[in-house]
Structure formats: structure tokens, C-alpha cells
Image: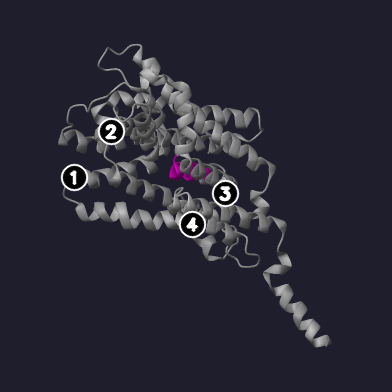
Amino acid sequence: MDMLYTISTQLYAMSGFAEFTWHNFVMYLVGGTLIFLAITKKFEPLLLIPIGFGAFLANFPQSGLGAREVGGIMNMIYEGGLKSGIMPPIIFMGIGAMTDFRPLLARPITFLLAAAAQLGIFLAALGAYYILGFTSQESAAIGIIGSSDGPTTLYLTTMLAPHLLGPVAVAAYSYMAMVPIIQPPILKLCTTQKEREIDMPQEKEVSKVAVILFPIVTGILTALIVPEASPLIAMLMFGNLLRESGVTDRLSKTTQTTLIDVMTTFLALCVGSTMAGQFFLRPETLGILFMGLFAFATSTAAGILFARFMNLFLPEGKKLNPCIGAAAVSANPMSARTVQTFVSKHTRGRVNPLMAAMGPNIAGVVASAFVAGVFIALFK
């Protein structure tokens, strides 16, 4: 009997139950919620399912599957792929291969909307620093959530505040998934019915030469102006050059399908595996979630209001539908589609601003990566 008791005690001590805490249980609920939303609500399933399952991995006691548990498989992926900064630029290369810059090149003025939409990033960073007491590096990581660009947010966070990767990533990807929920009330509040009815016909066709020169020139200028942003933007532009050159179809298709899918899966799973309960369930996590939402909402409003401001100086026939300013955040293409759905609903289908909204939406990707580079240069 004593031997049976001893063996049972040893087996219990060797099991995960011996170190199981309420932190683990709560994180199971968090991970389960992410997976539930991904499956039932179709909220970014390619991201939220691996992130949710990664949260399970991080909270299996004594399994060695957490990103911070040295020697485990997820730790090796985290150190070699995410912390090293390799995965986000590769994903940007895939995004570039999937991106058509023609809507932006047809209306380059919409680049100004993308610049205005970065306001939320700076305001949230200042709020995190002066109000919530985060360090300058942590505040920059929190502010960049307002870009609504997952790879950019993860790249900056791993460079400046890797200990915040879990809550920052959850905030960034959650708000990306909830773009169709968050943005319509802001659109309704910041625009009038008359403004929603402004039609923006397709601009003139962009030449092949301009389409090919744009990624080359943009990559060079970025490297010269903000070198810290070049890993992201250079890969974005390289992927786009593969797409537009017309002679690298195999590389383009591989980059925008297989390569980006593999990288996104490992990236999301790795992010989830950083969400160990003892690190994630802290009071500052609520502050990060709040400031991230503030940053995203403020960036959306800034893009809309700046479009209205620009209309004061634009002639009739050239005025912008201010709703496209909401697409100037980097949630590509979700935000542009949200703007299309909102405007179509409020104009009974008479106005379809999708292509017009894609311009600032694409520009937002470049602008947020540029801001991330500035933050890294200032605070690293």
C-alpha cells in the first residue's frame, strides 16, 4: 500500500497537475475564446486559431511548449523566427506580392490620409508613457497597435519590448479582426449623409513603368530616410516587384501563397505560446488593451477628419468621400471592405468606394512601417 501511495505521489509530481494554477485555467478560457470567435464569427481564423492554440501550449505545465521555456520547440521557433526579426519581413514580402499599388498611384494624394491616420499611434504612445507609466520602449509598442498591422506591431515589439509580446499581439490581432465592428460607429459619427454620397470615379490608368518603378524607388528612399524601417518596407516592395515585373510568376505565386501561409501559421502559433498566464494576467494587460483600442479608434477618426479637411481645398468633382479616410489604417484589405459596406449601406448601393479606399489602405501599410522604423531608431 505504501509503495502504491509512493508511486501515485511520484506520478502526480511528474504530471502537469502538480503545477497547474488558476492562471493556466484562465488562459485556457482566453485561448478557447479566440478559437470560438475564429470559428463561429469568422474573425481572422488564420490568425486567431493558431494564437488561441498557442495559448494552450504556453499553459501546459512542465510541457516545455511555452515560447519562454528554453529548449522547447516553440522557444526555438520564437528565438530563431520571431525574436530575431525574420518572420515579419518575410510576411511583408508575401503581402507585397498580393498588393496592387495602382489605386494609390492613381490618387497619390490619399497618401496624406495615411499620414494623418498615424495620429492614434502617437497619442496612444504618449498616453501609455505619461498616464499609465510605461517606459518609452513599451509605450512605442503599445502605440503601434493603432496601425492595425500585425507584422509591423510584432516586429517593433520584439525589438523594443519583447516581454509585452503576448498582450500587444492579442490586442493588435483582435482589433484587426473586429474592424467591421469598431469602424462603422466611428464612420457614422464623423461623416454626414451628404459626404457619404460623394462618388469617386476611377482615376486614369496607371502606366506599367510607374507600377514597376514605385517599389524600387520607395525601397531606396525608405532605406535612405529611415533605415530601421527598411527590413519591412524593402521586403514589401520586393514582393510587389515580383508581382508586377511579369516575368517572375512562380516566385510571386509562391510568395503570396505557400510562403506567407507557412510564416503566418508559425508566427501566430509562436505569439500564442508567449501567453503564459503568469506573464499575461497582469494589471498592465488591461492598460495595453485599452490604449490599443484608443489608438485604433483615434487613427480611424483622424483619417476621416483629415479627408474632410482636405475637401475644403479641393475643387468640385475632385472632393474625397471622407469615409475612405477610415481605410488609412493598415488593416488591409478589411478596412477598405468595411468602408465599402458602410457607404453602400448608407447610399443604397449607389456609391461603391472600394477602389478609392484601397489607395489609403495600402498607403497605411507603408506609413505604419515607416513610423515603426522611427520608433525603433529613437528608442532601441
Q: Give the labeled residue for mark 4.
A: 50
How far apart marks 4 and 1 lie (CA) works out to 34 Å
| Residue depth check, mark 4 versus mark 3: number of the one nearer the observer | 4
Q: Earlier in the sequence, mark 2 or mark 4?
A: 4
Secondary element under disc 1, as helix, strand or loop, is helix
Nearer to us in this view, 368 or 307: 307
Residue depicted at x 38% and y 26%: 323
Report the side of 40 relative to 63 (left or right).
left
User: Element under label 4?
Assistant: helix
Query: What's the amino acid at mark 3?
Result: Gly
Q: Reading the chain from its start, which is encountered first: label 2 or label 3?
A: 3
Bin the neighbour count of mark 3 within 10 Å (Cα to Cα): few under 14, some 14-19, many 20 and up.
many
Tag 2's secondary structure? helix
Start-end of magenta stretch: 149-157
Residue 337 sits inside the magenta stretch:
no
First along the sequence among labels 2 and 1: 1
- Residue located beneath label 1 in the image: 245
Q: Is residue 246 visible?
A: yes
Assign the N terminus to one quadrant of the image. bottom right
Nearest the viewer among 122 and 330 is: 330
Which residue, given by chain and number where applicable, does mark 3 sit on?
A: 166
Q: Where does the image place residue 178, in percent across and percent down from the top left? A: 48, 41
Instruction: Reply above or below: 168 against 46.
Output: above
User: Which circle's residue, 1 or 3, is located before the other in the chain?
Assistant: 3
